[in-house]
Amino acid sequence: MTAPLVLKLGGELLESADDDRLLGLARALVHLAARPLVIVHGAGREIDAAIGRAGIVRQQVDGLRITDEPTLAIVVSVLAGLVHTRLVAAMCAAGGAAVGLTGVDAQTMPVVPAPLYRAADGRVVDLQRVGMPIGGERVPALVGDLLTLGYIPVVASVSAAADGRLFNVNADTMAADLAGRLGAARLIFAGGTPGVLDEEGRTLPVVEETDIEALIASRRATAGMTAKLRAAAAALESGVSHVAIVDGRDPARLARLIEDDSEPARTLVCAAERSLSKGAGSCR
C-alpha cells in the first residue's frame, strides 16, 4: 500500500452554519483521496458552545481541553456524534467512500490516562479524562484494511482505555500518532490559521523541530498552536518525513496548499537534519 496522507481537520472547518461550505470542503477531501487518505478531526467550537449551553466552565491549557466527567459526556456526544456524522455524510455526498470511526473501534487507538501536564507557564495540571495514545509500531488493523479496500477512514478524536473507560483525545495528538504508526508520507494540520506566525503576523514558511520549544516558551505560539507544534515534533520523531500546518478555510485552495510546497499560507515543520534555510519554504 502507498504511504497514506494523514490530514487533521480543525473543528472550525466543520461548523454547521454553512452546509454549502462543508460540502465544498468534502469535495476537496475526496479529490485528495485519489491517494490513500486518513482524516482525523476535532470539534472545538461546537463543543465549547454545547458546554456553554450546559452551564459548564470551559477549561483549557496550551490548547488542551481539561476534561472532567460532564465535559467528557458533551465531547463524546458532539465530537463523535453530530459533527462526525455530518462530515462523513458530506464526504459521501461528494462521492467519497468515507467510513466513520473513533479511536475505540477495533482498538484503533488504545489510550492511557494522560500524565500530569506541565504547561508553558510552569503550572502542573491534571487534564482528567484526557487520553494519551499508547503508541508503538503496530499499524491499526482496521484503518489499514479500509485503506487497502479504497475507503477513507474518518476518525473522531475520542478513544478508550483497556478497561473500556472513554477519554477525550486531542485531535492533533491523535493525528500525529496515527501518522507515525501508518508510516504516513505527510501529516497535515488544516485549521483556521495560515500556519505559525511571527511577531508581525506573517506566516513562517519553515519551523525547525529544534525551534519548537523556544517558540512555545517565548509565547510566540498561541495555545492551539502549541498543541500542533508538539504533535508535529512527535510525528517527526516517529518517522513522518513532512509535517505542514495550513489554512483550510478556503476548500477550493486546500488541495493546492497540501500538494504544492510553493503555496503560501502554510508552515512546514522539519526535522533539523532535513530543513533548509528558514526562508526556503521547503524540507528535504
Image: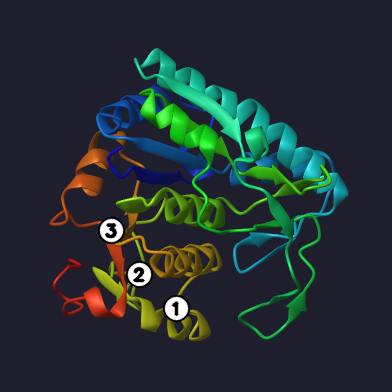
The residue singled out by tag 2 in the image is 197
Residue at 68% across / 38% down in the picture? 104
Q: Report the front residue among 200 and 151.
A: 151
Lower sequence index among marks 1 and 2? 2
Dots 3 and 1: beta carbons under 8 Å?
no
The residue singled out by tag 1 in the image is 220
Residue 41 relative to residue 161: left or right: left
Figure check: 29 above or below 214: above
Kind of residue at disc 2? Leu
Q: Would you say residue 213 is visible in this rendering? A: yes
The residue singled out by tag 3 in the image is 266
Which picture quadrant has residue 253? top left
Kind of residue at disc 3? Arg
> Where residue 130 sits in the image (x, y, percent)?
73, 56
Q: CA distance from mark 3 to mark 2?
A: 10 Å
Q: Secondary structure at mark 1?
A: loop
Residue at 47% across / 52% down in the picture? 181
Q: How many residues crowd around disc 1 within 10 Å: few (fewer than 14), some, or many (20 or more)?
A: some
Q: Would you say residue 14 is visible in this rendering? A: no
